């Protein structure tokens, strides 16, 4: 015996009561059709809110990228030294943000449609 026998019994009764309408085939089919209909029509507001939150998080992370790239060692000799102007911390941070935004732009329309 456990200390929560009364609670366990109430919980079993609640689950049994909730499952009763699904015991009949017609009601179970109607419930399944309702769930499938909701899944086939995603909530656009939710997708936009999640995309916006992700974009804000990416922007906040992007503000920190310049400091991370500022510590990177840029070669002073050889072929890479010729492209050192492309590797400034600001440029690398902008490139990382462009990649992140490009990924959102590719994925978000598929989730909304």
Image (tube, rainbow, N blue to C red):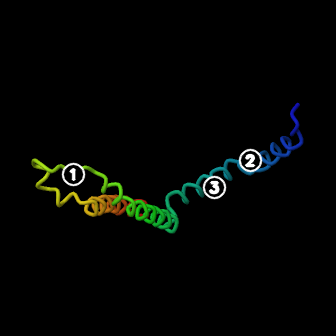
Q: CA distance from mark 1 to mark 2?
A: 65 Å
- Mark number displayed over residue 19: 2
- Residue 58: x and y in percent read 41, 61
Disc 2 crowd, CA 10 A, few/some/many (<14, 14-19, 20+): few
- Mark number displayed over residue 74: 1
Residue at image coords 63%, 55%: 30
Of discs 3 and 1, which sits in the foreground? 1
Of residues 110 and 36, the one drawn nearer to the viewer in this rendering = 110
Which quarter of the figure has residue 113?
bottom left
Left or right of 4: which side holds 51? left
The residue under label 3 is: 30
Residue that extends furthest to the front in the rendered view of this protein: 76
Q: Earlier in the sequence, mark 3 or mark 1?
A: 3
Of discs 3 and 2, which sits in the foreground? 2
Residue at image coords 31%, 58%: 96
Left or right of 87: which side holds 2? right
- Residue 106: x and y in percent read 33, 60
Q: Does 58 sit above or below residue 16?
A: below
């Amino acid at each position: 015996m456990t200390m929560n026998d009364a609670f366990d019994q109430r919980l079993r009764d609640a689950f049994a009561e909730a499952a009763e309408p699904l015991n009949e085939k017609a009601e179970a089919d109607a419930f399944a059709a309702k769930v499938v209909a909701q899944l086939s029509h995603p909530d656009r507001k939710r997708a936009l809110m999640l995309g916006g939150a992700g974009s804000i998080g990416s922007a906040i992370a992007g503000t920190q990228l310049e400091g991370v790239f500022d510590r990177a060692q840029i070669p002073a000799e050889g072929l890479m030294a010729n492209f050192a102007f492309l590797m400034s911390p600001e440029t690398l941070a902008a490139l990382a943000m462009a990649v992140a935004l490009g990924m959102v732009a590719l994925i978000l329309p598929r989730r909304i449609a």
